[in-house]
Image (cartoon, helix red, strand yellow):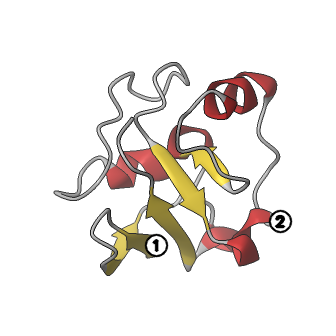
Amino acid sequence: MALLRVVDRDAVEHEVDAKTGLKVMETLRELDYGVAAICGGMCSCATCHVYVDPEWQGKLPAAMSDERELVSELTHHQENSRLSCQIEFTPDLAGLRVTIAPDE
């Protein structure tokens, strides 16, 4: 387990244990204040949309074209938008800070 910092939709920051090797979405969907993740990680619904803190953006693998396309169509799209189902939580990401985006 490693630390994942999550800012919920009420702007409250939580520190949670996240299992490495899982997608960030898998941790977030288990939280009462987490994401819906309706498609289960298939990169098709964007209900796991998060904003990655700028200090962490460069540490993540680049988004694939399908993720970039889906995120770009969201009303609440920002430069640091990502789908948490596409981010594998590795030991190098211990301390990662994400903010759950507003519902679409």
Q: Quadrant of the C terminus?
A: top left
Q: Quadrant of residue 6?
A: bottom left
Q: Residue at x 27, y 69 (%)?
A: 10
Looking at the image, residue 83 sits to the left or right of residue 28; the answer is right
Q: Is residue 89 above or below residue 87?
A: below
Task: Quadrant for the N terminus, please.
Answer: bottom left
Numbered mark located on residue 58 in the image: 2
Residue at left 75%, top 64%?
Answer: 57
* Residue type at numbered disc 1: Leu
Q: Position of residue 75 (x, y in %)?
A: 53, 36
Q: Is residue 87 visible?
A: no
Residue at x 43%, y 61% (from the top left corner): 19
From this viewpoint, which residue is outermost toward the front?
A: 75
Which residue in the structure is indicated by mark 1?
A: 4
Residue 23 to residue 11: above or below: above
Q: Going by the image, does 19 lie left or right of 70?
A: left
Left or right for 63, reference 35: right
Residue at 79% across / 66% down in the picture? 59
- Which label's residue is closer to the chain start, 2 or 1? 1
